[in-house]
Image (spheres, rainbow, N blue to C red):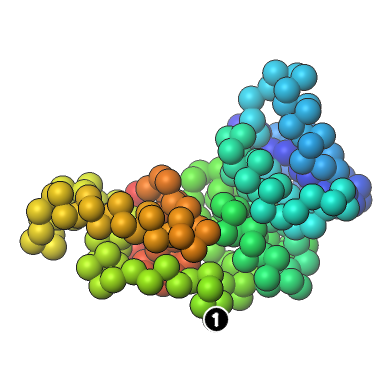
Amino acid sequence: MTQVALIDDHESVRLGLEAACDRNRSLHVVFSGSTVTSYLDWRRFSDSPPADVVVLDLTLGDGTTIPENVRALTSDGSSVIIHSVADRPDAVREALAAGAAGVISKASPTEDVLDAIRTVARGELLDNVEWASAVEGDRLFADAQLSMRERDVLRLYAAGLPLKAVADRLGIAYSTAKENITRVRMKYIDVGRPAPTKVDLLRRAMEDGILNVEEGAGGG
């Protein structure tokens, strides 16, 4: 069963999602509150494991910033879905760059929100209109300035091939493929979009159009 935390300073939104999750046998709400701090305090005092997925309001009223909230939750071990009216693309981009797994509009049907939670809980990328519109045309977000070779290595590696197989496919040495991936990671760090894991590299490749959704899903 997927453990879900709901963080939103609008109580009616939380109660509605909580009720919807309670009707779904695969989702269990372990926390419902208005701030990330209250969630982390609950974690610490209850000695509970991190929620599998945290559904987070884009902007909370406690003075915290979007990146710090997302990073606090992801570093704690949870995947984060931004639940937003999605009328601030710059804020959505900040959340995605900080490591959020995707964004779902508050105007979406409740079942779509539950589907998004299940998708992210499976470790899959959340591909939707809100994400695409937030990333589209944002050169600062997308511009890691990867070389053609780095893009080729990233595309194959992020699609699921082991690094040795990537090297064989491209006709280059394993050490060269490894060096390319290292440079890719460094370039993403330089533009504020770190990708420390292979899943993160998959997300970056899809965000930047290097890999499409079908290829990413096929890579396992």
Locate residue 119 relative to residue 208 in the image: left or right. right
Locate residue 11 relative to residue 20 in the image: left or right. right
Q: Is residue 110 visible?
A: no
Q: Quadrant of residue 96?
A: bottom right
- Whether residue 19 is situated above or below residue 59 in the rendered picture: above
Residue found at x 42% / y 46%: 196
Please give the count of numbered marks on the rendered protein. 1
Q: Quadrant of residue 98?
A: bottom right
Residue found at x 73% / y 50%: 56
Residue found at x 36% / y 66%: 211
- Residue 43 coordinates in the image, percent (x, y): 72, 26
> The N terminus is located in which quarter?
top right
Say which element carries label 1. loop
Q: Going by the picture, which residue comes out furthest to the bottom?
A: 137
Q: Residues within 10 Å of mark 1 (few under 14, many from 20)?
A: few
- Whether residue 43 is situated above or below residue 38 in the rendered picture: above
- Residue 75 coordinates in the image, percent (x, y): 58, 38
Q: Is residue 21 visible?
A: yes
- Residue 204 coordinates in the image, percent (x, y): 44, 61
- Whether residue 70 is situated above or below residue 138 in the rendered picture: above
- Amino acid type at circle 1 is Gly
Observer-nearest of 52 and 70? 70
- Residue 220 coordinates in the image, percent (x, y): 35, 49
Residue with the mark numbered 1: 137
Observer-nearest of 38 and 187? 187
Residue found at x 56% / y 48%: 120
Q: Going by the picture, which residue comes out furthest to the front?
A: 190
